[in-house]
Amino acid sequence: MIQFISIIDIQGGGTSRWDFIHPDSPKSLRKRLEKYRGLASNFIYAVITAFGDEIVGDRIRELRLSEIKFIFMPLEHKDDLFYVVFIVDMKDNPVATQRTFMNFYHRHFEAFDEILTATAVPTNTVERLRNSMAQFLVPLARENKFFSARDKTHLASSYVVSLLISTLFTVTLWGFNVQFDLMEESPIVLAELVFVFLFLLPGIPIGILTQYGRHAIIVAFLNSLTVVVGATFLWQDLLLKSAHQFIGSIVVREIVMLSATLVGIMLGTTLALVSYFLAKFFERRRLTCIKRLKHIPAIVKTETSDFDKPPKAPPIEERGETEE
């Protein structure tokens, strides 16, 4: 999720013309951004000034930290050059960040034009844009954190649900086999249906569930291995007899399981490709949900000692006695 936005006026000495702090950001991060919001803009301005626009270029740039990252991109508003700074979740795609802001920028172009070109900007325009941005971000991330955080919980949830969907496809395929006796009548057709139902179609729900390319690949391979190895384990006696008839020698159970694992990996490649491209489609358009940050502690207010406190003025009565 986009936690912070600042539009920096490069030609105006790096001043921030408009900024936004997500109202639902983790409290620790929000407090720091409210207190040091100018430092984030000054930091990126210092980078651009030190290395120059020619080195920074006109592309999206990233600066990764522990759980968050800075993204900055150029923005040409009429004839002036600005840079937009974002603080986002580590798992957010820069393309999705840029696409989100540019859609919002074009939708509220008149208000941005007033902010970026006028000398004195009305406070109500700034606040109205901030409120509109908060509402604009709501539909871009799922509310269910089990399927939107792009963390280990999201990975596990996607795997479990995708496995249930694959089970549903397996039951459907079994029903086709019983109805039309494909095992005896058309074994080749059955093999094709197995490939489509178990190693092609599940890629669609995996991509939709994960919406994150890296997780899509992991879930796809785990799904494929679970289906193939699980089926091999259930029907291992039948497979051992069939292998013995074809090969004519003793086939140990370990060889059958290893062969099933290799088959699962090979077939999982197809499933991974389908799910990866579909997940990337959503990843470049959707943002992560708001989640707790572990490595950003809250600002602790420290009490000042007596030496740090400014001296108090004496009471009026004491002042009068001193003057006398």
Image (cartoon, rainbow, N blue to C red):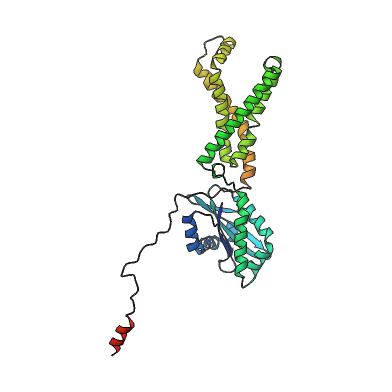
Work out whether residue 17 or residue 20 is closer to the camera in this orientation and state it.
20
Is residue 198 shown to the viewer in this render? no
Q: How many numbered circles are shown?
A: 0
Q: Give residue 45's quadrant in the image.
A: bottom right
Q: Position of residue 12 (x, y in %)?
A: 58, 69
Q: Position of residue 186 (x, y in %)?
A: 71, 17
Residue 309, above or below 163: below
Q: Would residue 109 be found to the left or right of residue 72 on screen?
A: right
Residue 147, above or below 222: below
Q: Would residue 31 be found to the left or right of residue 136 on screen?
A: left
Q: Give residue 177's quadrant in the image.
A: top right
Residue furthest to the bottom:
324
| Residue drawn at 65 percent across, 62 percent down | 76
Is residue 68 shown to the viewer in this render? yes
Residue 299, above or below 94: below
Q: Position of residue 25 (x, y in %)?
A: 52, 54
Q: Position of residue 21 (x, y in %)?
A: 54, 59
Work out whether residue 178 or residue 113 is closer to the camera in this orientation and state it.
178
Q: Give residue 220's quadrant in the image.
A: top right
Work out whether residue 131 or residue 253 is closer to the camera in this orientation and state it.
131
| Residue drawn at 64 percent across, 52 percent down | 99
Q: Quadrant of the C terminus?
A: bottom left
Q: Would residue 303 be found to the left or right of residue 6 on screen?
A: left
